[in-house]
Structures are given as C-alpha cells and as structure tokens.
Amino acid sequence: MARFIKRFLRITLFLITTIILFFTIAFFIVTSEPRVPAAQNTIISDVTQLNLIQVSSSIQPTSIEEISSLIKSHDGPVSIGGARHSMGGQIATENALHLDMRKYNKILLLDTLTKEIRVQTGITWRQIQEVIDRNNLSIQIMQTYANFTVGGSLSVNVHGRYIGHGPIIHSVKSLMIILADGSIVETSPNQNSDIFYGCIGGYGGLGVIVEATLQLTDNCKVERIDQHMTIGDYPHYFQTQIRDNSNIIFHNADIYPNDYTDIHAVSYQKTDKPLTITDRLNPIDSNYKVERFAMWLVSEFPGGKWLRQHVGDPLVFSSDQVKWRNYEAGHDANELEPTDRNKTTYVLQEYFIPVDRFQSFVPKMAAILNQHEVNMINVSVRHAKKDSLSLLSWAKSEVFCFVLYYKQGTSPNEQQEVGVWTRKLIDAAISEGGSYYLPYQLHASTKQFEHCYNRIGDFIQLKKKLDPTNKFRNKFWDKYNPSANLR
C-alpha cells in the first residue's frame, strides 16, 4: 500500500506540473512579441545588449592582406570582434575601426594523418565540425557551444568540459598574428613564443590572430552517465571516479540554487553501445521554444528552481543517451537566447578555485548570492588542469571552474547592484587562492584584476613593444591597461 501511495503521489505531482507547464507555455507563446533584429549600423554590442559602443566604422575583411592593410593605414584605435559572446565591451571601444572577423572563415589545411587543422580565425567551431566530422575527427578543446569563433576563443583562452585538459592553449600548434604596423608574424611555442603566449588570452590587446593551427583528436561514441549527490560528496566522487578516468570525455556538475547544497554530476564516457541519437551533429537553427521556456520557468515561475531539480532534470535524465562526441560538442548557444533583452538579460560569470578549496568556497559563494537575492539559473562546475603558459593565465593551479548563469535587470541601478556582489565573489575567490574569468562584465576593481593576473606587467611591457601607440583597444583594455595612452 505504501508503494502504491508513493507512486500515486508521484504521478499526481507529474500531472499537476504538466498542466501548469502547458498553460504557462500557451500564455507565454501568445503574449510574447517577436524579437526584432538590431539594425546594422556603427553601434557594436554583445549578446547581453548591455554594452552599446559607437565605433567609427565596422568592416568585414575576407583576406589577410586586407586586414594588414586596414591596420597599417588606420591612424586610430582598432578593435576586433567575432561572434560577440563576450559580455563587457571586450570587442570594441568608442570611435574605433572595428574588424568584424565573421567573413574571414576558411579552412586552409586539414591533415588527417597528423590530425591538425589550419583555419582563418573568423570561422566558428560548428563550421569546422561540419568538415572534420566527415573524417571522423573532433576538436580537442572548445566551449560547450559551437557558435563561437576560433579567434574569439583563443583571445579569451577558453576551456570546455573536457577531462584531462585545461584551456585551449594546450591544443594550439601555431598562430599567425598581424601586429600594429601591419606586419605578419608566425608564432608558436618555439617561434616568437612571447607573442604566442601573450595573444592567447590577450583579449585583442597585442594584435589580430588571423590564422591558427589546432590539434584535433578522434571522434567516438559517448554514453551519458549521471549521479545526484550532496556538495560535500562531490570532491571525493570527482577524484575517485572522474579525474583520472581516461574513458571520460566530458564532465560537468550542476549546483542547484538557491540552497546550493545538492549537485548533479553528468559525464559522457567512451562506449561501443548502439547509438540512441543517430545524427552525427547537433541540429542548428531550431526555434528552441521548449529550452527557452524552461529558462523562463526556472528564472521567473514561482517554484521554478524546485521544479527543475525535482521534476525537470529527473525526466530529462530518465533515459539512456549514446551519441557521437561531435554531437555533444556542438550545442547551439541560441537555445539560451531569451525572447528579448530589453528589461532583463542573461549573463555569465566564472570563478576558478583550487581543487582542494572546493568545499570552503561554495558556502561563501552561496551566502553572497542569497544575500543579494541573485536570480541564479545555474552554477556549472567544470575542471581544468594548470596553465603556466599564457601571460594572463587564469589557472595557476589545478582548478574547479564555477560557471554562473544568472538573470539580471538592465537598468543602471540593477547593473550597479550586480557590480557589488560580483566584487564580493571575486574577493571570496581570492580568499581561497582563486581567480575570476575576464570575458564578462567589467565589475572587478583594478586592484582585484592585478591581484588575480599578476603577470599583467609583463603583458603591458610586451604591448608597449609591439603596439607603442596603443592601437589595439577595447573597453576591457581601456579599463585595465594601467599605462594606456588613450588617443
């Protein structure tokens, strides 16, 4: 009888939730206004729509010669942009010549024997996947979402969910860079290495990355496995089950707000099992109504976060999944895009915490987020190995990466409030020997930035050498370059 009652209650809860979801979806679809694309002009903005920057002109070059000529002949600031998923003005500054790299997107060489590819850096990861998948090859390190350009990914030294890897710098064989005088230089760990290690993670401050040679790997089938646990159990689980498991390709763990006491670990491991998803690549250009509604539900609906944890995720993960690695590596960021960003917008932050400080950081993070009533949608935990190469390294030791995805208002007061709790989170990360990520809103103080990126002096000296007139600029470098000679 007890089992019957429990089963009856679960079914009843499911039916009630389904009815609520149905009517809410209907209301949302009926009342939502269609999103109007922004006019194409000299206003440059990023995906958040929080940073509208007036540039002098925006040009989409298609050749290396054109880029070199534009830089050499332009007597003023030059900014560089790709897919525009940075979130704090890292792609533009006022009155700059803006190089929109998205038409500079050819594959120059694919060597299937050495598993290397050379590309123009305006190409997106998805465009690469569509070619290399035919050869059963896969990108070694990239973000979860495939919409980003290679050049932008290199400029922020991205990482993904890949176990045994760290930031993308570990998979780069060489780069071609155009400097402020228009000269073109080949760089690698063995050739012009100072420029190589400065440009990866250099946020467009030293030059334009125009070509990149990247290490690829084999495509394979992967099986999804997941486990729910408490925060206290996760570090041991990761160390014993995930960290040194060579069969694990992807791994992340989602911390549920607003309690921040439970975590859901999700991995994809190599398998020979039959595919449950037979498509080789993730479909693109979908309308994503279900995904977008789920985001709205979690962020706005009363009890939405509880429904996600106790109803939504158990349903999503109730079935087995076997798919291609390239499929799982090819998500579309448009599935996260809201109907509009006028009054509210979705934003990211990220913090890097030494692995042995995981349990002491989480309570500090939770206290700050709850004190400021942050509308947190998700906190995703990833892992990265140490990077001692890039001048602006964010992983000075082996770290857990806390990716915060939240909803905020767009008014000046609401933006200022985000700055307050962001600086508190940065201080909390610093207190644990950690750091924060730079592609997002520029709320960090100069003191915080210089503490977390203590080789900034070496970077600035290199910039003075390569770019003495401070030609390569954006809002990020306008704020954090301590010796900027703004023109």
Image (cartoon, rainbow, N blue to C red):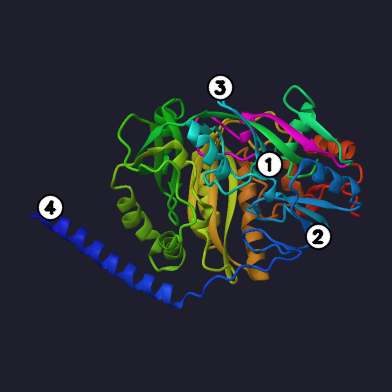
Residue 419 in the image: state x and y as whole percent. Answer: 66, 59
- Of residues 116 and 154, the one nearer the viewer is 116
Residue for point 38% across, 43% down = 230
- Of mark 3 and mark 1, the one earlier in the sequence is 3
Span shown in magenta: 155-180
Q: Amino acid at mark 1?
A: Thr
Mark 1 to mark 2 CA distance (whole Å): 21 Å
* Residues packed near mark 4 inside 10 Å, few (<14), some (14 to 19) or many (20 plus): few
Give residue 3's mark: 4
Q: Amino acid at mark 4?
A: Arg
**Residue 183 at least partly seen:** yes
Mark 3 to mark 2 CA distance (whole Å): 43 Å
**Image depth: mark 2 or mark 4 in front:** 2
**Image depth: mark 4 or mark 1 in front:** 1
Residue 76 horizontal side relative to residue 413, left or right: right
Identify the residue at the far bottom of this view.
31
Mark 4 to mark 1 CA distance (whole Å): 59 Å
Q: Secondary structure at mark 2?
A: strand
Q: Is residue 163 magenta-colored? A: yes
Q: Read off the residue under disc 3.
A: 113
**Residue 252 at least partly seen:** no
Labels 4 and 3 touching (C-beta < 8 A): no
Q: Read off the residue under disc 2.
A: 57
Residue 323 horizontal side relative to residue 6, left or right: right
- Of mark 3 and mark 2, the one earlier in the sequence is 2
Mark 3 to mark 1 CA distance (whole Å): 22 Å
* Residues packed near mark 3 inside 10 Å, few (<14), some (14 to 19) or many (20 plus): few
- Of mark 2 and mark 4, the one earlier in the sequence is 4
Residue 442 in the image: state x and y as whole percent. Answer: 70, 54
Q: Amino acid at mark 3?
A: Leu
Q: Read off the residue under disc 1.
A: 121
Q: Amino acid at mark 2?
A: Ser
